[in-house]
Amino acid sequence: MATGREWLAGARPRTLPASAAPVVAGTGVAWFASPAPPPFGDHFQVMAAVVAPLLCLVVGLAFQIGGNLANDYSDGVRGTDAHRVGPARLVGSGAAAPRAVKRAAWLTFGTGCLAGLIAAGLALAAEPAGRRWLVFGVFVVAGVACVLAAWFYTGGRHPYGYAGLGEVFVFIFFGLVATVGTTYLVAPRTVPWVPAIVMGAVTGCFAMAILVANNLRDLATDQAAGKITLAVRLGDAGARRLYVALIAAAAGGLVVTAGLTTWVALAGLVGFALLVTPVARVVRGATGRELIHVLARTGQSELVAVLFTGLGLGLGWCHG
């Protein structure tokens, strides 16, 4: 039976900034667009501005952890994780039974879905009665799509993660869907669509960079196991160039966001200072366990960048 520490490792805490950052980014953009900052708005605005971000955070973390456990289960039963460079997995190492990991994944998904339904229900109060069921349906479809995307990354007969499409789905769900969805749920009356989409692209690029670093680390073992990730398709040199390009694109997106909102949001570029060493390691050809540091630091950089961007948006609102 797996210990608590092993279950915590199975949740892959190094990847969790990728699910928290879009919530922070979407909340910052939403607060900037609000006519009055919390807690000075009306009752509904206070509810949306304070409760919705917390619910969105539960959704993001639950879907991320559920996806990590689903990935652990699917790769474990396929034998992909039998020989790993990175941390041992629950199923692959034999620490936990496949059935237990699968059950934990679906229970975690269920927690995220419940929090998402509550958040969507709160936001519907701002919609005209005739549109409420339509909007609610959109969120239900989005939630189901998120769960299916998490499960079929390595699950099912034809997992898209084995076909080099993981980064595309990560950009969509951990970037655009999570950030824009959070923005709507926090400020349904005044959704700033363009800045939200741009920040969604920023968080999406970061999430892709995290996955590229992960797959670059596992390139040799994935290739041997028949897991054709994007890193395997691009090759070692191509994956390294992609990582650097994604970091540059994320920085460019923050500049665009500042231009659309307030230049104080450029404070988010502080987060990129954490990437000096990781980028240098990737460029010079770091392999194996060295890339574990790159993966963790990329997630930390994303979270710091969006936190400072949110702070800049708040200061920009106050002085706007």
Image: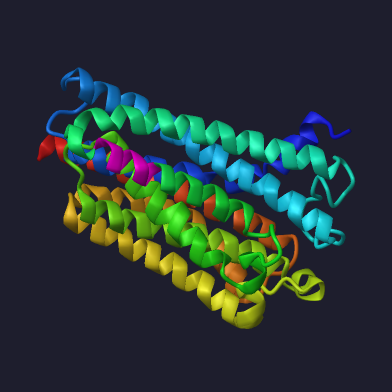
Residue depicted at 45% across the width and 73% down the height? 245
Residue depicted at 35% across the width and 34% down the height? 120
Q: Is residue 288 above or below residue 20?
A: below
Q: Is residue 94 magenta?
A: no
Spot occupied by residue 248 in the image (x, y as percentages of width and height): 41, 68
State the quadrant of the C terminus. Answer: top left
Can residue 27 be spotted in the picture? no
Along the horizontal axis of the image, is 88 left or right of 51? right
Q: Is residue 51 above or below residue 185?
A: above
Q: Is residue 137 magenta?
A: yes
Q: Is residue 218 above or below residue 13?
A: below
Magenta stretch: give its range: 132-139
Along the horizontal axis of the image, is 41 left or right of 256? left
Spot occupied by residue 215 in the image (x, y as percentages of width and height): 66, 66
Comparing 258 with 92, the one in front is 92
Spot occupied by residue 34 in the image (x, y as percentages of width and height): 17, 35
Comparing 231 with 70, the one in front is 70
Residue depicted at 21% across the width and 25% down the height? 45
Considering the whole magenta stretch, tell me its main secondary structure.
helix
Q: Is residue 311 above or below residue 249?
A: above
